[in-house]
Image: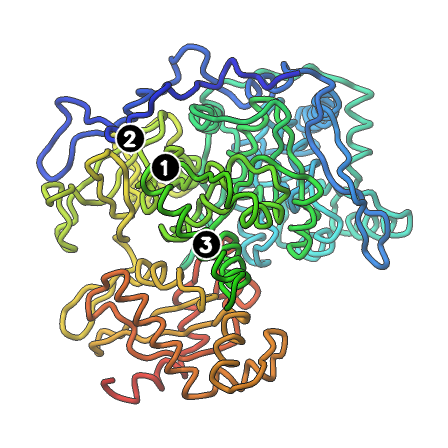
Amino acid sequence: MTLNSEIVVPWPPVLPYDKQSVQVPGTKRPGQTAHYRNAIFGLLTLHTPNSLKTLDQVFQSGLKTGSNRPFLGHRPVVSKNPLKFANKYVWETYGQVDARRRHVGSALYAMFKSGQVGGGEYETVGIWSQNRPEWQIIDIALQSYQKVSVSLYDTLGRDSVEYIINHAHLTVIFSTSDHLPALLKLADRIPHVKLLVSIDDLTPEVKKVFVEWGEVHGLKVMELRELEALGRAHPIEPIPATPDQVACICYTSGTTSDPKGVVLRHRNLALAAHSNLYGLELPEDATLLSYLPLAHIYERICELCCIAVGAKIGYFTGDPLRLLEDAQLLRPEFFPSVPRVLNRVYQSAMTAGNVPGLRGNIFRKAIAAKLEKLRRTGDATHPLWDKIVFRKIQAVLGGRLMLVTSGSAPISSDVMDFLKIAFACEVDEGYGLTENCATCAKTLPNDATGSGTVGPPQPINEVKLVDVPSMGYTSDDKPNPRGELYVRGENCFREYYKDPAKTKEAVDEEGWIHTGDVAEIDSCGRIKIIDRVKNIMKLAQGEYVALEKIENLYSSSSIIAQIYIHGDSLQSYLVAIVIPDPIQLATLASSIFGRKVSPDSIEDLAKAIADRRVHERVLSILTAEAKRNELKGFEVVRRIHLSLNQFSVENGTLTPTFKIKRKDAYQMYKKELDALYALGEP
C-alpha cells in the first residue's frame, strides 16, 4: 500500500526562493504592512476542494490507505525488574485502531448519554499520559464521537492539574497507573470527576486498592480494557463531526499565571494539518518517532499529518535516556524536534569530531566543504563526505531520516546549517503557537539562505506586521519592514476558555492573533523573528532590553546548557545565571587545571565553577558570542554566576514547555544576582 497522496500537494518543479510570499493588493494601511500570503500555494480555506475539515476526516484519510497497514508502534516491556524493553517495535494496524476507537467511543457515548458522566458546557474528557499508542487511540475516539479532549501535561505540577480539571469541568480522565494515586488524593478538590480509567492493566491487588479508594470519594475506577469491552458489547457508529465543533481545549503553560485554555475546533486542527501536507515528501513506509509531548500542539499536528497520509508512528519508551536506542530500532524518516534536543546533537557532534590530528582535520574539511555547497546551492548532500564522515552522525538516529523539523523555540542559523549537512536531508524550522495550531510559517527545502528565518507563511495563513513605536520597529523600516507579527487563518483560535479579557488581548475583531513576537519580512518574503514585545525591561540609562531574545542568542553557545539573564532598572548593565553544559565545562576545566576533569564528577565540576579562571573563560566565550550576534553594548552580559543547579519543572522555575518562569528563577537566585550587582560597575 502507498501513502494517501491524494491530499498531499507537491512542490512545483522549480521553487521560487526569491519570492516566497506575496503582498495582497489593497491591504496596506498606515502603521502596518500589507497582508502576506504564501506565493507558491495561495490561501488554503475551508472551501478549498478536497480540504480536510474535521479530525474524523483526517483519520478516515489514513484508514483509506489500508486497514492492514501498520499504524501505532511501541516497544513492549519484557522485564520490570530490571526494566527492559523488547529490541523491536510491535504494531497495531489502522484497522485495529479503527475497532478500538469505536469501542472506546461507544462506551463513552453511552455514559454521557445516561448521565453517569458529563454536566459541563462541553463533554470534556481528560488524558494524562506520556506518549503511547493508547493516547492516540483515545484521542481518535473522542474526535469520532463528538467529545472534547483535554490534555494534562505529564510535567504539570499538582496545582495546575487541579486547576485544569476544574476549569474544564472534567468528569472522565484517562490516566496511566502512576498518576492514579495523585488523582485520588485530589478527589475532594475535583468534585466533578466521576470516572478514572487506567490506561494500564492493573494487578488484582492494586486494582482492588484503587477501586475501594475511589468508592470512598464517589469515584469509579476501571481499566481501559474494561471500558473497551463495554463499547464492544454495545457498539454505536461514529458520529460525524462538523468543522465548527470544539475538538479540544489545549492548556498553554503560563509563566506568570494559571494556564490558559485555548479552544480549538475541528476546522482549526484539521486544516492546520492539511496545510502541513503541502510540499510534504515522505516514502510509502514513512515512520515518525514520537517523543515530544502529545499534550503540546506541535507534536500533535505532526502526528495528525502522519495519520492523514497513512504513515506509521512509533512511540519512544518514555525514557529520554533510551531515545537514541529507540531511534536506532525504529529508523524513522520523520523526526519532529526542538532546539533543546538539536543543540545537544550539534554540540555532541562538534565535540566528538573537532579533535586534534588527522581525524579532526578531516572533520573540519568535511564541514567546510559541505557548508560551502549548502550556502551556494542549497544542496545538503555530498558523495564523499556523507559516506566517510556524516554517515556516523546519521546512524545515531537510525540512518534513514528524510525530514527533521525544529519548532517551539528559536534555533541559531549555524546549528540549522550544521544539521542540514550532518543529516543530509530536509531540515525545516517552523514557527507557530498553540493559538494557531503550531502552524504559521515554515522554511522551504534546499533554501540556500533560509537558515535564520522561519520561511514564508503557511498556505493556511496570512500575516502582517504592525508598528511597535516604543521599540523602534515600523512597517516602513529599511531594508525590510519590521513590527509585531499578526497572523490570521482557518487554523486560528477564537477564544480562551472562560477568559474573555485574555481573549480580547490576544485576538482582535478581524480575527488577527497578536503573537507578541517582533518580526521582519525580508526581500524573499521570508519571516524572521527578531524580538519579543513582552519581557522588555528598561535599564538605568533608559535602554530597552528584550531579555528572552538575548537569552536565545547566547543559548547557541555550546558552553550553555541554560541561561537566565537579569536586568535591574536601577542598574546600567545585565547579569546572568549560567548553567554550563557538563561536557563543555569539563573540557574547559581540563585545559585550565592541566588534568582530566570528568563531566560525570559533580565534585570536579563544582570546583570548576568556583574557580575564577573558569568564570573568566566562560564570560569571554559569552562576550564573543555577543559580538558574533552584533549585540549592542547594553545587551551584553557583564557579570555571571555559574551554577550546577538547573532550572526545572520540578523546582518551579520552568514551565512544562521548558520556558523560564522569570519571577521564580529570580527568587531562586536572588542572593547570587544581588551579589553580582553589589560588586559595582564592571
Q: Which of 173 and 420 is in front in this view?
A: 420
Q: What residue type is labelled 2?
A: Tyr
Quadrant in which the C terminus is drawn? bottom left
SS class of the residue under badge 3?
A: loop
Closer to the eye: label 1 or 3: 1
Q: How crowded is mark 1: few (under 14 residues within 10 Å), some or many (20 or more)?
A: some
* Comes first in the chain, label 1 or label 2: 2
Of 155 and 596, the residue lying toward us = 596
Residue occupied by mark 1: 378
Of callouts 1 and 3, which one flags the residue occurring earlier in the amino acid sequence?
Answer: 3
Tell me which corner region of the image, top left, top right, bottom left or bottom right, holds residue 304: top right
Q: What element carries label 1?
A: loop
**Residue 297 seen from this side:** no
The circle drawn on residue 270 is none
- Relative to 560, is 411 above or below? above
* In this picture, residue 608 sits left or right of residue 599: left
Dot 1 and dot 2 residues touching (CB under 8 Å): yes
Task: Please state the horizontal and vertical placement of residue 493, each as a whole percent of the image.
Answer: 39, 33
Q: Where is residue 202 in the image (x, y as percent from the top left)?
A: 84, 46
Circle 2 sits on which residue?
Answer: 17
| Amino acid tagged 3 | Asp
Q: Name the residue under label 3.
A: 258
**What amino acid is labelled 1 in the image?**
Gly
Instruction: Give the quadrant of residue 577.
Output: bottom left
